[in-house]
Amino acid sequence: MLDIYVDADACPVKQEVFRVAKRYGLNVTLVSNSWMRVPASSWLELVVVDKGADVADDWIVEHADVDDIVISGDIPLASRCLKKGAMVLGNTGRPFTQDNIGDVLSLRNLLADLREQGMITSGPKPFAKKDRSRFLQALDEMIVKTRIRNGIRS
């Protein structure tokens, strides 16, 4: 069964995930290092893991499976989930795939090196309305393609 796992601590699209998941009748698991308010619903679960580097990531990797969707902007987490056969969608609607994850990891490492050297002093662009729209469209497409591949028509 297709489930959605959200790396929830800094995720700006949780409400969008809820809307799409509810429409398709999918289960959503938010994984976080701290408690957060979530709507009370049988298809929505909040898992609070211990604080620490990669604890939430490790939980997601352990539970995500083939045809599940992971929502995260964390590129190393995306790489780990892809190796398990899960699909991964970034917060801005960019799908991470086996074809692009190597380039994305390389770019991430290059930018980190440039920041350490002081050559880049700004962070990523602010999250924009078009990012939210692109995310919604990409999540919907990912779910539809997976359902068709698994013979689910409704």
Image (tube, rainbow, N blue to C red):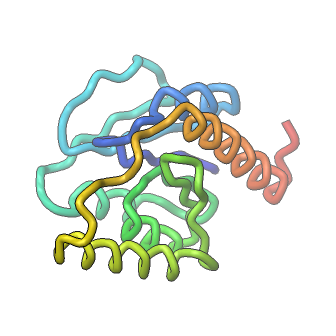
Looking at this view, is 50 or 122 the one in front? 122
Looking at this view, is 54 or 122 the one in front? 122
Quadrant of the image containing the C terminus:
top right
Query: Residue at the location (18% across, 71% down)?
Result: 118
Query: Residue at the location (32% across, 45% down)?
Result: 31
Picture coordinates of residue 35, whole percent (x, y): 20, 31
Which quarter of the figure has residue 112? Answer: bottom left
Q: Is residue 88 above or below residue 106?
A: above
Picture coordinates of residue 65, whole percent (x, y): 53, 63
Picture coordinates of residue 107, whole percent (x, y): 43, 76
Left/right of residue 92 with respect to residue 74 in the rendered view: right
* Residue closest to the far top: 40
Q: Is residue 36 above or below residue 64?
A: above
* Residue closest to the far front: 119
* Residue closest to the far left: 51
Q: Is residue 110 above or below residue 94?
A: below
